[in-house]
Amino acid sequence: MSGQQPDRGGASQIFQPLAGDDPTTVAGYRLAAKLGAGGMGKVYLSYTPGGRAVAIKVIRPEFGDDPEFRRRFAQEVQSAQRVQGLFTAPVIDADTDGPRPWLATAYVPGPSLADAVVAHGALPVETVLLLIAGMAEALQVIHGAGIVHRDLKPSNVLLAADGPRVIDFGIAYAADATSLTGSGVAIGTPSFMAPEQAAGRRVTPATDIFALGQVAAYAATGTPAFGEGTSHGVLYRIVHEEPDLSRVPERLAELVTRTLAKDPEARPSVAEVIALCQSANAETVLRRPEDWLPSTVAADITVRTAAPAPDRTPPPPGYSPTAPAIPSAAYSPTAPATPTPVPVPVPVPAPGLFPTAPATPVHARPYPYGAPVPPGPAPRPSASAGKRGVLIALAAALVFGVAGGATAYVLLKDKDKDQGRQTQGGGAPQGDQKGTGSARPSATPSARPQPKPAAYKGIDLTAGYHLTLGDDDVRPQDGEDGGYELSYDTGGYLDAESSGGSLVLLDAGQEGSLAACRADTRYTQEVYVDKLSKGRQVCVTTGTGHIGLVTVRGFSAEDSPSTYLTLDLTVWRDAAGSSSNG
């Protein structure tokens, strides 16, 4: 899906009316206009109840029907909701389980970089420096959330009055994981891919740095650095040839050249990109004025600010529009749609009647939400019935109070007898010593046996393979998606596959053990390999009750025909439910 507004021109072209096959609402959001369409689906304009404009992206049915896409899409949306940067369009709402998956991001009233360059030509050097520095800050936040954008291109960069906005981070990864990528659905733009991405190798944050260099060259010259043409031709040049930087301004030459290095390790980090922008600027500190964009581009922002409002008249009861609606849970961008507990009325005794008998809290009762009530109006109690009810309640309370007092007396008396027997016998009651009499549980419960560790050294876990910790002989097996317990996903991360499984990346220098894995609660579903280094450890808790400790020992060489991770694995089987520390 390529941005919020792929078409340029006047308001009538930007805000397109809804067609017959467009929904009128999405999960309670009334749609005001269509902003565009792309390979992933369609983008609509709507508003929150408070009046905030949002862009709602409805995924194409082909993707919604793919279970693998839904799984990856749910993971990426969950990660994207943690991204809250100054130069990103935050994800504020989503539904990954409905008939048509969708997500809502903040609407940015500005053209995409692609539209601006096509309409008005290359941007000035000062604008490009501010553009790239802002995009680098966005990548810093995105990468910090464990996301690699994978599809950073001019149409995924929006130009707002106060700086750029990077959108659609993580969605391309969900699309890449589906079978649709081999059936004619084009995902990504070849002109802005990195060499390792084009060659099908491991994707890392450095992949986004290469795309950032391509975006800089495009913004400064108006053409892609590796030219245009067929996808195969462009991808060949990206992998094997050098870019054409003859038209790149001198002040941008070092920035573009370093970011477009073929070797990912040779590319600058995000912080170094920002430093290169600062050094290329006349000032030592980048300052973003209100008029950071050329006046012609700024005029496009004015057009997009005048967004149309949806029809605020609610439909009459029973009204069924001809256009379909996408059902989902009611609008709730910040809180999950969980049922609100209904308080049960509790009779309150008269003041001073039972000063020592506290009322039973509602949440401690067997039916916290009350017993089911049959449909129809409840009969009104008569006055005499009400009086009888009060008298019965008072009588019952007195009976229970007397019975409770008698019970407490008997228990205290029995306790005194037990203590006397223990004193006379010098230990446990005589009946217990003989194995007769009342059997009472001991004060100290018997500890569960300590699970024994099983160690597996030097496992080469290849991308696309998995481990099952419950196996007697744990060894890599083909497959990365399913009910497995730990897999090395071809997307470049370790994945807790089994239902209820989780991972914890221990801090550098933190000593891994069974106790450490039990105590640490920084759970995640996946850990990207680029965050790992030799000696780092990952705790694995499986849905089947096992705990494993992964210790990274090395990585495959660059010239290796396969991508793999060398690791040591210690497994404590059936240890997840045990309370003893190891």
Image (cartoon, rainbow, N blue to C red):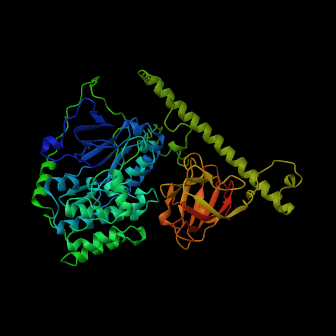
Please state if 582 lies on the left or on the right of 60 as rendered: right
Could you say which is closer to the camera, residue 432 or residue 386? 432
The percent position of residue 433, horizontal first and vertical second, equals 87, 55
- Kindly identify the residue that appears in the image at 65 percent across and 54 percent down: 469
Q: In which quarter of the image is residue 22?
A: top left
**Percent from the top left, x then y, of residue 342?**
44, 38
Asked whether residue 577 appears in the rendered view, the answer is yes
Residue 514 can be seen, yes or no: no
Q: Pick the residue in front: 60 or 428.
A: 60
Quarter holding residue 211: bottom left
Is 576 left or right of 33, judged from the image as shown? right
Q: Quadrant of the C terminus?
A: bottom right
Q: Nearer the viewer, residue 200 or 438?
A: 200
Q: Does residue 297 sit above or below 12 in this rendering?
A: below
Along the viewing direction, whichever of 407 and 215 lies nearer the viewer: 215
Q: Residue at x 12, y 45 (%)?
A: 10
Question: Residue reaching furthest right?
Answer: 434
Task: Give the residue displayed 64% in from the left and 49% down from the top.
Answer: 544
Residue at 20%, 63% in the rendered image: 221
Q: Whole-percent x and y of residue 473?
A: 71, 55
Q: Is residue 534 left or right of residue 448?
A: left
Give coordinates of residue 392: x percent, y percent: 54, 30
| 440 lies left or right of 506 | right
Q: How many labels does the image show?
A: 0
